[in-house]
Image: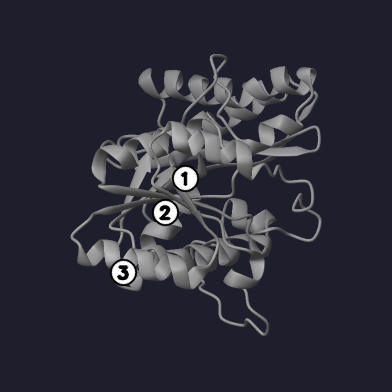
Amino acid sequence: MEIIKRTPQMKALAARLREEGHRIGFVPTMGALHAGHMSLMQRARQMSDIVVVSIFINPIQFGPSEDLDRYPRDLAHDAEICMSRGVDYIFAPLIDEVYPENFSSYVIVEGLSDRLCGASREGHFRGVTTVVSKLFNVVKPHFAFFGRKDAQQSVIIKRMVADLCMDPEIVVCPIVRDEDGLALSSRNVYLSAEERQAATVLHRSLEKVQVLFGAGTREAAVLQAAMEELIATEPLVRIDYIEIVDTRDLEPVQAIEDGRPVLIAVAAFVGKTRLIDNVVLNGEI
């Protein structure tokens, strides 16, 4: 496995690999790798000849009051994980390799980026789509792998790829959870033991919705109220949003129709840590 830090070197390598007929699988990350990222690497290994993982903490997707400065950083540990999963290359560029002086070009997916997480994290998805588009240009992947925990991100990236005629096929992989149901996240390390236990209420609220849906409840307001009621039992958890939306355009739905894929998404602060989780009914993203 090789770690590459220069953009021209990665571009030249990717071009050569394509010329040689290799199929490149790409897993973009911000490091602090965990079992969820490992599942993406495993899927990439299954579908690709060459697996590239990027490790880059993207400053332009963090708001001014968010956790950029304290976001976990441990490239050596991340490299060990990548090596254990058969990754061929890590692309770990420095900031000025991605955002040179006087950088002023951004990619914005209008109509999807200002909803759900975008409503409370202004500019976040502009940062995500900009860096992902740049990484696609550098790594030149045939496949790019994302986790469904970041469901809105996956919808936005798919729209960007379709709208801009980009090459990669976007593969959205299932959420990976701990035994207690908490969705794996690099930010889980911020949680105290008490907060960690309280955070499981997010998954439990989604499980409750699935039970209600299975019993025939289709009204979005009823399902949302049930989630709010359960989450309210945990005093350490404060809801940012609960949304029930169409998976294609993220528009709110009033009732869930048979055969119509619907995303039920929740974001909440557990102590000072913001976590997200979701479930998709009637299909996948």
Secondary structure, mark 3, is helix
Amino acid on which disc 1 is placed: Ala
Quarter occupied by the N terminus:
top left
Contact, CB < 8 Å: mark 3 with mark 2? no
Q: Position of residue 268 (x, y in %)?
A: 68, 37
Residue at numbered disc 3: 15
Viewer-nearest of discs 3 and 1: 3
Q: Residue at x 70, y 17 (%)?
A: 197
Q: Which mark is residue 9?
A: none
Q: Position of residue 130 (x, y in %)?
A: 53, 69
Q: Name the amino acid, label 2.
A: Val
From the top left corner, tell me how far across and down residue 199 is, in percent.
Answer: 68, 25
Which numbered marker is on residue 151? 1
Q: Secondary structure at mark 1?
A: helix
Please determine whether, in this image, residue 193 is positioned above or below residue 274: above
Which residue does the image show at 64% across and 55% down from the upper left?
57
Q: Mark 2 = which residue?
A: 155
Q: Residue at x 40, y 31 (%)?
A: 218
Please name the residue shown 51% across and 71% down the image.
Answer: 108
Residue in front for this viewpoint, 3 or 42? 3
State which tag comes first along the sequence, 3 or 1.
3
Question: Callout 2: helix, strand or loop?
Answer: helix
Gap between marks 2 and 1 measured at Cα: 6 Å
Marks 2 and 1 close (CB-CB < 8 Å) = yes
